[in-house]
Image (tube, helix red, strand yellow):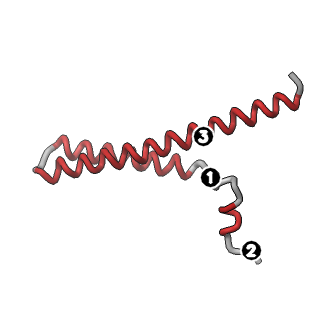
Amino acid sequence: MSELEEGGAARSRGRRRERDAEERARRALGGGGLLLVAGLALVGVGPSDAGMALTVLALVVLIYGIHSFGRLGTEQDGQSEQARAPSR
């Protein structure tokens, strides 16, 4: 395999990893949101340890999702570059 082919394969693996990381982050955010709603509903019905535990778990999942989504960095399509204020 030539160096050019190896570089293309490495870029392909890198893009796949980024896509997988973004998908995991989005799933964590969606799942955390659903768990939070369920936990708050259980707590709203009446004081329950299960509702409190579910709410805390949901908050941890949401924090993980926000953190991992933020670690992905800026978009590569150039739109985020244009939105920045010009530097002086």
Label placed on residue 81: none
Mark 3 → mark 2, Cα distance in angstroms: 31 Å
Disc 2 designates what residue?
A: 87
Label placed on residue 73: 1
Question: What amino acid is found at the position of numbered circle 3 in the picture?
Answer: Arg
Along the viewing direction, whichever of 11 and 47 lies nearer the viewer: 11
Question: What amino acid is found at the position of numbered circle 1 in the picture?
Answer: Gly
Classify 10 Å Cα crowding around label 3: few (below 14), some (14-19), many (20 and above).
few
Disc 3 designates what residue?
A: 19
Can you tell which of label 3 and label 1 is closer to the viewer? 3
Residue at (67% x, 69% y) in the render: 84
Q: Residue furthest left?
A: 46
The numbered mark, 2 or 1, whose residue comes first in the sequence reads: 1
The numbered mark, 3 or 1, whose residue comes first in the sequence reads: 3
- Disc 1 secondary structure class: loop
Classify 10 Å Cα crowding around label 2: few (below 14), some (14-19), many (20 and above).
few
**Vertically, is 60 above or below 3?**
below
Mark 3 → mark 1, Cα distance in angstroms: 12 Å
Residue at (52% x, 46% y) in the render: 68
Mark 2 → mark 1, Cα distance in angstroms: 20 Å
Residue 54, position in %: x, y? Answer: 26, 43
- Disc 2 secondary structure class: loop
Relative placement, left or right, of 48 versus 26 is left
